[in-house]
Amino acid sequence: MKITARKGFDWQRVTWGRPDSVPTVLCSYCSAVIPEDFVPLIFWNRESYSCRFCEKCMTTYFGFKPLEREDE
C-alpha cells in the first residue's frame, strides 16, 4: 500500500525528529500539540528520522479519518 499526501501538502515544511531523540508531542507539520491519548500518524524515512501528524493534518493532508472515541 502506498500512502501519498494530498495536493497542497509541502514536505519541505515537515520537521523530522532524530532517531536518537524522544518523540515530540508536537505535530511535525503545524506544530499543534498531539494529545497523550491520541495515536498520531507517524512516518519514518530510510535513515530512521520520524515525523508525526496531528488529527487535523492527518485528515486534511492524508485523508485518514480517526475512529470515534468512546466516552470514558
Image (spheres, helix red, strand yellow):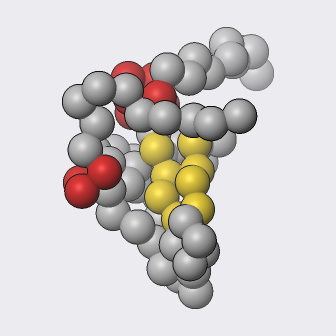
Q: Percent x, y for residue 7?
A: 29, 26
- Residue situated in front as seen by the camera: 51 or 1: 1
- Residue situated in front as seen by the camera: 48 or 57: 48
Q: Is residue 56 above or below residue 15?
A: above
**Extreme residue toward the front, this view:** 2
Viewport quadrant of the N terminus = top right
**Extreme residue toward the bottom, this view:** 20
At a point 56% along the width and 23% down the height, the residue shown is 64
Q: Is residue 22 something one can see in this rendering? A: no
Q: Percent x, y for residue 60?
A: 38, 23
Q: Is residue 32 above or below residue 71?
A: below
Give residue 16's quadrant in the image. Answer: bottom left
Q: Percent x, y for residue 51?
A: 48, 58
At a point 37% along the width and 54% down the height, the residue shown is 28
Q: Is residue 28 above or below residue 7?
A: below
At a point 23% along the width and 54% down the height, the residue shown is 13
Viewport quadrant of the C terminus = top right
At a point 57% along the width and 35% down the height, the residue shown is 3
Q: Is residue 46 something one can see in this rendering? A: yes
Answer left or right for 12 relative to 28: left
Question: How many numbered circles are shown?
Answer: 0
